[in-house]
Image (cartoon, helix red, strand yellow):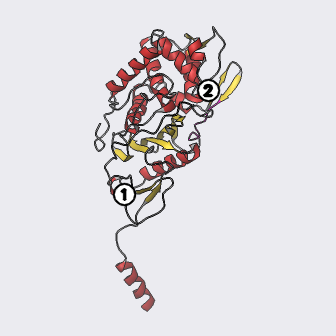
Amino acid sequence: MIAVFALLLVVGCTTATPPESVLTVPAAPQKYAAIVVDASTGKTLFEVNSTAQRYPASLTKMMTLYMLFEALESGRVTKETQIPVSDHAGSQPPTKLRFRRGETIDVDSAIRAMVVKSANDVAVAVGEYLGGGSEDQFAAMMTAKAHQLGMVSTSFRNACGLPDAGQVTSARDMAVLGIALEHRFPQHFHYFSESDFMFRGRLVRGHNDMLGRVRGVDGIKTGYIRASGYNIVTSYNADGRHLIAVVMGAQSARQRNDHVEALIQRSLGPMTAAATQPRLMYAGQQPAGSALPGLAAPGVAAQGSSLPGLPASDLPSPDLASPSSPLMLPAQ
């Protein structure tokens, strides 16, 4: 009886305040940005630096694909349409499929090449084709479409995501684009779940390791240049829950994927994000009792983060609205 009474006394005296949650971030604070959105309602479940400008890297190809899907829907192209690969397109740095002068690629293969391989030569070829022969014109079309979708922090300068100081976006804008792709083109979204494809008798493998790693993940796209770090937009759709998670600025693909998985699991939990906003432990920082530098108050995105330097030699990996208001979901 004494032991039971002692146990009840201990339980009764324990505080109801849960221990502080600390989330390890595999990125420097000036590069990191993230957001998790309920794609069914537009509600933001987690965000840090979500409206700060960042380099999209190959996430750019999501908009190139959006424009290509629109062209398919309008009848401007079919999946059998042959897209010429110009010398300019063929000269793009890897990752690429590599074409000889005068060769073409059909639209269906071009979609797979951009999604799975993140092929820069194919993305530029598509941009030139849809832009009337001009990648610059296509980039202006991409930017106009981004603003039409509500991507207020985004400007495109090329079709593939190779380094350009003027090519910027935000984690929130990438979430808007991810949701728009799913809502606007459900008949084409299956491409984003493919991890390989056959091209000219050769199996081309992808590098989005979130596919098959987490049950319910069905896309979308990875990206990397040195100035941006490792970026990803991920769609989770299972058990009646539909999330879009964006992480930008990670130091490695593996750490980025671990972080995305942690954010998904956290967002699927019973507690709301607003009630459990964690303290962030950025790469290179040590645990401390005080607030971490570079972290805004819970529920407030840190603004005004300067863009990291843009080395001229950056190449993609060879493998590879108001912050508190709901995202405006695109019309079906």
Mark 2 crowdedness (10 Å alpha carbons): few <14, some 14-19, many ≥20: many
Tell me where residue 195 appears, x and y as whole percent. 61, 33
Magenta-highlighted residues = 205-211
Instruction: Say which of 305 and 98 sits in front.
Output: 305
Is residue 111 a member of the stretch shown in magenta?
no
Residue 209 in the magenta stretch? The answer is yes
Q: Give residue 99's quadrant in the image.
A: top right
Residue at 33% from the left image edge and 44% from the top image edge: 303
- The amino acid type, in three-letter code, at marker 2 is Pro
Which circle marks residue 94 in the picture? Answer: 2
Q: Secondary structure at mark 2?
A: loop
Residue 161 position, x and y percent, is: 50, 27
Circle 1 or circle 2, nearest the eye: 2
Nearest the eye: 326 or 142: 142
Give the image location of residue 235, x and y in percent: 47, 38
* Residue 13 locus on image (x, y percent): 35, 79
Instruction: Answer with mark 1 or mark 2, whichever residue precedes in sequence.
Output: 2
Q: Answer with the quarter of the image where residue 101 lies.
A: top right
Location of the C terminus (image quadrant)? top left
Q: Which residue is mark 1?
A: 276
Quadrant housing residue 207: top right
Report, in whole angstroms, how far the alpha carbon at label 1 lies from the one at label 2: 42 Å
